[in-house]
Image (cartoon, rainbow, N blue to C red):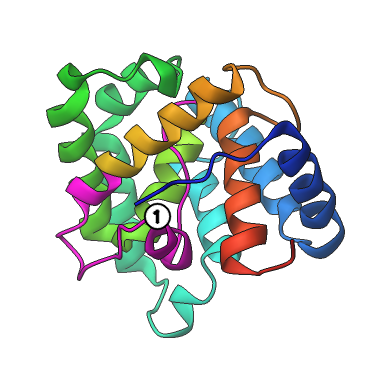
Amino acid sequence: MNIYTPTPKDLEAARTAFESREPRDLFYRAATELVELAIRQSTALTLAEALAVLLQTWNRSFYQYRRFDIRHFSDIELLVTRHRRQFLAFRPRSIQTVTAADDLGVKSLFAAFEEVLWPVGAAKCLHLLAPHFFPLWDRAIAQRYGLAMKRKGFNRDNYWQFMSIVREQCRVLGGGRPVGPGLLKAIDEFNYCKYSKKWI
């Protein structure tokens, strides 16, 4: 499948559309800051609570049909406790540093998060935990990239392929951070505005 790489102009157009039409960006910025503070232990909030800020807003359609109750929250707390060392190792890295040696580590981490948060929630939380390494996706974006989501537990290979595609897009774009909070977020805004919402 021929994958389109957005241009800097495309990213700018997406940022403009995203800022004017997506009020939930506030919660992304809040969650990003809370995650950083929680990792540094500079807030009374736990890391799971910081992630919940994004899940309850950006993933609200998912939770229309599933309860975000104390049991689910406990599962998220256990998840981040068990895998803290793994995601912290990825946190300082850029997606452009991804190599074949990361295959097993990325897939196993994604699988663990997918088991609790399903494929879209897993990518959202991993992105917050390592925002320059893990890209965001949703069902419409995955479909457009030829990686249609399967049932829970069977998406690790597709996510790894998606990472490879986005890494190449970043390479073509020159690896900088042209707009917004980062290149991965800028590419996601383009994908979301163009493929999920058809705003551009």
For the residue pair 43 and 129, the one nearer the viewer reads as: 129
* Residue 193, quarter of picture: bottom right
Left or right: residue 139 versus residue 186 is left
Q: Amino acid at mark 1?
A: Tyr
Q: Residue furthest bottom?
A: 65
Left or right: residue 195 versus residue 117 is right
Left or right: residue 107 versus residue 89 is left
Q: Identify the residue at horizontal 49%, vertical 20% (top origin).
A: 171
> Height in image: 22 above or below 28?
below
State the residue position of label 1: 145
* Magenta run includes residue 141: yes
Q: Main secondary structure of the magenta part?
A: loop
Q: Magenta segment range?
A: 132-159
The quarter of the rendered structure image containing the C terminus is bottom right
* Magenta run includes residue 127: no
Secondary-structure class at tag 1: loop
> Height in image: 78 above or below 179?
below
Q: Position of residue 131 (x, y in %)?
A: 51, 31
Left or right: residue 108 versus residue 65 is left
Q: Position of residue 118 (x, y in %)?
A: 30, 62
Q: Is residue 130 visible?
A: no
Q: Position of residue 5 (x, y in %)?
A: 55, 39
For the residue pair 174 and 74, the one nearer the viewer reads as: 174
For the residue pair 48 and 155, the one nearer the viewer reads as: 155
Q: Identify the residue at horizontal 32%, vertical 65% (top origin).
A: 72
For disc 1, the neighbor class at 10 Å (few under 14, some 14 to 19, many from 20) is some
